Image (cartoon, rainbow, N blue to C red):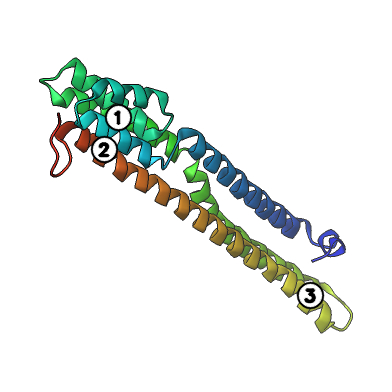
Amino acid sequence: MNLSMFQSLPATTLAVFLALAALSVLTVTVAIFKITQFRRMGLGRHAEAETILDDWLNGRPDEAQRKATASGSVLSRVLRAVMSGLRARPSDPFYGEELARQAALVELTRMGSRMRLLEAVVQMAPMLGLLGTVIGMIDAFGSLAASQAAADPRMLASGIWTALTTTAAGLAIALVAYFIAAWLEGRIDDERQTIEMVISAAIHGRVGQTRG
């Protein structure tokens, strides 16, 4: 669709196109924000957590805490909380577990921020596209009904094609937003499960391994 076609669009249809463009910009912005945020939070750095756990479970708590403090990953911050609780109250593992779960809740809340925006785009984009199509069809047939001259099938087809384009654009934006949201949610779920495992391992030990 070239610029002249945009200029000839009815105001309502043009408004729908602009709204869809805004949703596409929002999707890209949120995706870039989340990817940058995950990198800064240290999402997925599981190898560092394994090293910290190895030190902790093999009787090197000072080294484990030093590494957890120096690391900038999600798992290291959770491990730092659980180890601090266990060292402060060795006879009360529930205290360490509670500190770890509080730290995990903070991390998961940060990871889940802005995700609802992508969910909103997935729901709104197809509806906006359909609205644009309905409005475009109404305008096309309204112009045809008001015309005193013989109907030009080419003009009618052009109007219908333009109207249907909004639905296609809305579906395309929704699909992109859906796949981005699914990928981000997958990373969050993976981190959530790993957090649960490292908390349990720090308190109870790994299978076949006891704390030193």
Q: Earlier in the sequence, mark 1 or mark 2?
A: 1
Name the quarter where the N terminus is drawn: bottom right
151 is higher (above) or lower (below) than 179: below
Residue drawn 42% across the image and 48% down it: 187
Describe residue 90's horizontal placement relative to residue 32 as left or right. left
Describe residue 134's horizontal placement relative to residue 76 as left or right. right
Name the quarter where the C terminus is drawn: top left
Place of residue 63 in the rendered image (x, y in percent of width and height, measured from the top left) = 30, 23
Place of residue 176 in the rendered image (x, y in percent of width and height, measured from the top left) = 56, 58
Q: Counting other residues with Cα less than 10 Å from the Cα at mark 2, is it few (<14), some (14-19), or many (20 or more)?
A: many
Q: CA distance from mark 1 to mark 2?
A: 7 Å
Q: Which amino acid, by three-letter code, is at mark 3? A: Ser
Q: Counting other residues with Cα less than 10 Å from the Cα at mark 1, is it few (<14), some (14-19), or many (20 or more)?
A: many
Residue drawn 35% across the image and 34% down it: 75
Count of number-bearing discs:
3
For the residue pair 188 and 203, the one nearer the viewer reads as 203
Secondary structure category for the residue under label 3: helix
Place of residue 107 in the rendered image (x, y in percent of width and height, measured from the top left) = 39, 33
Whether label 1 touches label 2, CB < 8 Å = yes
For the residue pair 132 and 83, the one nearer the viewer reads as 83
Q: Earlier in the sequence, mark 2 or mark 3?
A: 3
Comparing labels 1 and 3, the label whose residue is closer to the camera = 1
For the residue pair 118 and 198, the one nearer the viewer reads as 198
Place of residue 209 in the rendered image (x, y in percent of width and height, measured from the top left) = 14, 39
**Image disc number at residue 198:** 2
Secondary structure category for the residue under label 2: helix
Provide the residue designation for mark 1.
79
Q: Which amino acid, by three-letter code, is at mark 2? A: Val
Q: Residue furthest top?
A: 88
Q: Which amino acid, by three-letter code, is at mark 1? A: Leu
Whether label 2 touches label 3, CB < 8 Å = no
Provide the residue designation for mark 3.
158
